[in-house]
Image (spheres, rainbow, N blue to C red):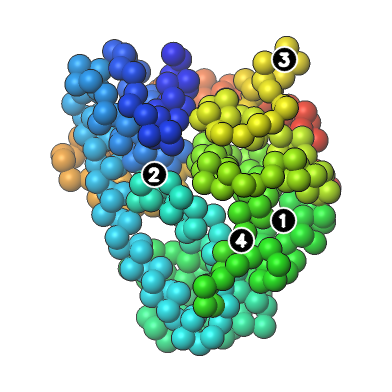
């Protein structure tokens, strides 16, 4: 397998609970770079541990995988305590709050601790916005910034971003997500989460936004897989009609088909990448998504937790910024960025992704 194919295969093994086939490789640094850049180095590490010993990476690279795994497990316990304090602060003041993306979806993964993430995204009603900020500050949360409808707070190094509305990609999706505390969500006490159908819709619109604006990574596709895998009763045909209503049906079909191709997502969908006219789209999606991840806050924090030796720390810092093509000269990197830019344009032209700013 090529480097990016084997990287995807390792992630797929984790999602499917499979032991990986071992093969001796000389590109483990590039595989680690890909995993780290996409925020799934802990997931990859869990699978690497299952490889036959003679097929695992060696030396400092193996240490990097092990450190990513250990840091994710340690950070999870701290983050859950911070999240508990956050939920308590708002619930004690009777303030409804909606959790989205990683804070909810990580609980659907085979090992929640390994689904790392950055800021925890939370939605509150506009009328409760300033009361929520007051409640958090009174319980030890540090306010980092605050705008009219967006605020950031931290506690114990964990970041929370509060917004008064869900992210939307166009006017149609804005309408669907305009009442997040009504019929599209469910709650336990004052803590809400989107219903599976609407969470899948939200994740796909989020990916579409990043395909348009840049920064889409493989974790967004694993989130699609994990939602469908855990909620088998989602009616995909009805879901695609919903996507058609907000003008992202082809995007949804392509992303679900991509998840199925990469991870064997248990879903029936007519869109495939086996036809001649979709193979280039698959190539573009693979290149953009595997190389489009960004080093998130938790990944950056993990870098400071390295304790094996100084050389490992240095390798960790540099590998996070490396391209999955390997170490390149600056001129070569410019060429690669141009290639990715062209692929991104081809993707959103092919899928007809439109944003509300257009």
Residue 349 left/right relative to 184:
right
Q: Earlier in the sequence, mark 4 or mark 3?
A: 4
Sequence-first tag of 4 and 2? 2
Of labels 4 and 1, earlier in sequence is: 1
Q: Nearer the viewer, mark 1 or mark 2?
A: 2
Tag in front: 4 or 1? 4
How far is disc 3 from disc 2 in space, using C-alphas? Answer: 33 Å
Q: Nearer the viewer, residue 75 or 254?
A: 254
Which one is earlier in the sequence, the residue at label 3 or at label 2?
2
Q: Nearer the viewer, mark 3 or mark 2?
A: 2
Could you tell me which secondary element the residue under label 3 belongs to?
loop
Q: Residue at label 4?
A: 194
Pick the quarter of the image with the N terminus: top left
Between residue 290 and residue 109, name the one nearer to us.
109
Q: Quadrant of residue 266?
A: top right
Q: Secondary structure at mark 4?
A: strand
Residue 7 position, x and y percent, is: 43, 26
Residue 155 image offset from top left, x and y in percent: 37, 71
């Amino acid at each position: 397998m090529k480097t990016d194919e084997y990287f995807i295969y390792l992630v797929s093994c984790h999602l499917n609970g499979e032991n990986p086939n071992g093969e001796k490789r000389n590109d483990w640094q590039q595989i680690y770079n890909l995993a780290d850049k996409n925020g799934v180095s802990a997931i990859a590490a869990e699978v690497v541990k299952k490889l036959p010993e003679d097929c695992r990476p060696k030396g400092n690279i193996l240490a990097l995988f092990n450190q990513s795994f250990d840091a994710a497990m340690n950070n999870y316990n701290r983050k859950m305590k911070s999240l508990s304090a956050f939920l308590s602060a708002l619930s004690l003041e009777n303030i409804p709050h909606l959790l989205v993306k990683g804070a909810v979806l990580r609980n659907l993964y085979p090992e929640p601790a390994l689904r790392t993430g950055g800021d925890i995204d939370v939605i509150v009603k506009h009328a409760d916005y300033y009361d929520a900020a007051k409640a958090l500050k009174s319980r030890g949360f540090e306010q980092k910034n605050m705008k009219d409808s967006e605020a950031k707070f931290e506690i114990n190094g964990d970041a929370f971003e509060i917004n008064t509305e869900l992210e939307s990609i166009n006017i149609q999706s804005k309408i669907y997500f305009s009442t997040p505390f009504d019929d599209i969500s469910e709650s336990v006490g004052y803590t809400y989460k989107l219903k599976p159908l609407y969470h899948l819709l939200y994740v796909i619109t989020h990916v579409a936004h990043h395909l348009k604006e840049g920064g889409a990574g493989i974790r967004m596709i694993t989130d699609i897989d994990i939602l469908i895998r855990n909620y088998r009763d989602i009616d995909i045909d009805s879901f695609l009609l919903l996507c058609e209503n907000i003008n992202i049906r082809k995007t949804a079909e392509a992303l679900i088909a991509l998840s199925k191709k990469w991870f064997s997502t248990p879903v029936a969908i007519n869109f495939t990448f086996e036809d001649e006219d979709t193979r280039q789209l698959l190539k573009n999606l693979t290149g953009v998504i595997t190389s489009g991840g960004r080093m998130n806050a938790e990944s950056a924090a993990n870098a400071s937790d390295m304790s094996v030796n100084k050389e490992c720390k240095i390798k960790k810092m540099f590998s996070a910024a490396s391209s999955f093509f390997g170490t390149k000269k600056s001129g070569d990197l410019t060429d690669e960025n141009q290639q990715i830019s062209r692929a991104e344009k081809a993707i959103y032209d092919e899928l007809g992704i439109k944003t509300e700013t257009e």
